[in-house]
Amino acid sequence: MEVPFDGQPEYTDVLVVGAGPSGLMCALALARYGVDTMIVERREYGQIYGNADVIQPGTIELWESLGLREGLMREGTPILAYASWSVDEDTGGLERQPQGPNVSLRDTRYPYEIALPIENIEGLLRDDAAKYRLQVEQPWIPTDLVILPEEVGKPSAHTVRVTLERPADSKWTQRKRTIFAKYVVGCDGARSWVREKVGIKLERRERDDQAVNWGVLTFTPETDFPDTMVKAVISTPDRGMIFWIPRPDGKARLYVPLSSKVDTRTTSRTAFLDAISNVVDHVFRPYTLKIKDCDWISTYKVIQAVASTFSAKNRVFIAGDAGHTHSAKTGQGANAAMKDSFNLAWKLAFVIRGWAKPTLLVTYEAERKKYASDLIAIDRDIATAISHGRNNARFYKKIWEERNRFITGVGVCYHSPLTPVEKPSPLAPRLTPGERLPPAAVLRLSDWRPRNTHDLLKADCTFKLILFPGEMRYSVTMVDSFVSTLFKELRSWTAPEREVLKLFAIFSDLKLWSHWTDAPESVRDPMSVYVDDSMVPDVADMELATTGVYSLYDISPEGCAVLVRPDAHISLVTPINVLGAQEIARFLVRL
Ligand SMILES: Cc1cc2nc3c(=O)[nH]c(=O)nc-3n(C[C@H](O)[C@H](O)[C@H](O)COP(=O)(O)OP(=O)(O)OC[C@H]3O[C@@H](n4cnc5c(N)ncnc54)[C@H](O)[C@@H]3O)c2cc1C
């Protein structure tokens, strides 16, 4: 899309630099939240760049909250099972080792990874962004960025001036633009220009012995190897581990460790393909594997690094690979990148709208830098497992299973002022503040539709307050006076409280004996009243699908109120009384 240039500067609330997974998620979320957003990309339209191909359960949940999960399912391949193999040292042939579920978790609705090409992931995000009239402007490259010192203290000022230019060899006539943005988000990858420009340093964390050269390729296999449709992990005595990831359309991706003598800068594509084919011929015996139609081949070294800070003057932020890099083995990079942006986007929207103070933005680094450091610690363990030792398949499986909650993204816990009390409340001991609300079966009373608590958590930039008051007929006064105190206390909040805080009530009644019109007046709405009498068909585990939410969350007989952030993480668990209402109001007003 060409943008007219009359020499005048342009203004936007947020300028996102880079249209990979983090940039697209950031811009898309902001556009959905009604924030004036611009996203620029240095590539020409249609040039494929990224590498990611596996979406984790926690990210599937995020996409579901945006109403985008169907696209992932339609265009991707769910990976449900995991097969492990090792090379027998005596015969030199492959031997089957224990197999199992790829995701060994109960508390997710989606116990699998989804493999799909990066162009599909980005394409789905771009298509959705277009519905909100947001298009990636490309090719544009930022050549200058200045945070105007005299404007920094004014929250509504367009404080960051960015010069954009066309790539030197491009055909466009319009060559230069000046953008003034309130905020800039650098989503421009591991070699981030934005990061460099604002002087943020990368702290390297990898060890020399883990700097293995990896060959990676996407291709159509011709093979009698039996585990082409699941994730296969092959342990070799001398080369570390080889990974097989199934892809849509009968394709596959292989990760193969190469000799550290291979010079990734000078070796040609054909030589790489030969090197990988040699390894594959040797390792897959007694099976045969021919690499047909290689779509993409590349090599990389594991670089583990975290940026020293994720923001400059609370005006320029970095997200995704710009802030942290690690190995591709746990399929985390794009997932982490999108989660970074999703974490940041609602905070930017709140601050830009004046619903929260700029200090809210500080929690982005507190939460996501800690996450990145934890990820790198796990990545190091996994890098050790896959590069060394005879029992590496077993060791890898052990780490994979032990850390599954973190790796899948469903067990990520945030520690920041947005989680004022970190210990679970005795009112709901199984809910951990800082973690995302676990999925649970509920039933919407107005139409008896089986739902999931996650269905209440649409990504619409609002806090959700979910009340668990027990039985409807005994809780009318309690709920009404709680809600009335809450909204009275919220009058000093700068946000339109009835729009930005959505209320739901989940009662412990049976559906046969209750009706939504009998619910306390303050929550009486056909879309807001639920009961703990359901069976949700789309939960990983039968027990989860059928066990009621009161029992799963271990809600105490007094009941409780659960405040959930716009990104589905739990902030507070309080009693349903005056003190609880005041605690929630205080939290929101102080944002
Ligand atoms: C072989 C391999 C396999 C991987 N597999 C997986 C996987 O299965 N799952 C997973 O989650 N992750 C995987 N990753 C990691 C994943 O690809 C990255 O972590 C992810 O793409 C990071 O997203 P991002 O948006 O932060 O950065 P990028 O994807 O790098 O996107 C950055 C964007 O910014 C643009 N850009 C760069 N500089 C500028 C500039 N100056 N101006 C404007 N635009 C700019 C780039 O063109 C690009 O479009 C893999 C990585 C590798 C190497």
Image (cartoon, rainbow, N blue to C red):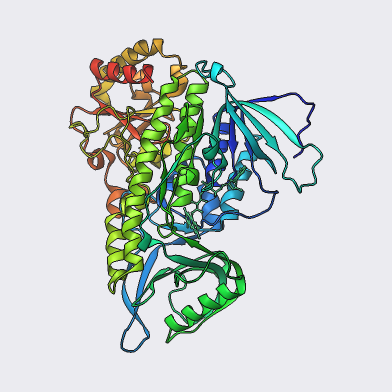
Q: Is residue 523 left or right of 574 when viewed as pictured? A: right
> Compared with residue 25, is residue 354 higher up or lower down, i.e. above or below?
above
At a point 52% along the width and 68% down the height, the residue shown is 263
Res 525 seen here? no
Res 83 seen here? yes
At a point 30% along the width and 38% down the height, the residue shown is 532
In this rendered view, identify the residue nearer to me: 93 or 541. Answer: 93
In this rendered view, identify the residue nearer to me: 203 or 354. Answer: 203
> Compared with residue 300, is residue 503 higher up or lower down, i.e. above or below?
above
At a point 76% along the width and 47% down the height, the residue shown is 170
At a point 32% along the width and 65% down the height, the residue shown is 385
Q: Quadrant of residue 360?
A: top left
Where is residue 70 drawn, in percent x and y? 53, 50
Where is residue 172 drawn, in percent x and y? 79, 42
Where is residue 133 drawn, in percent x and y? 66, 34
Work out which quarter of the rendered image holds the N terminus and state it: top right
Work out which quarter of the rendered image holds the C terminus and state it: top left
| Residue that extends furthest to the bottom in the rendered view of this protein | 91
Q: Is residue 173 left or right of 441 when viewed as pictured? A: right
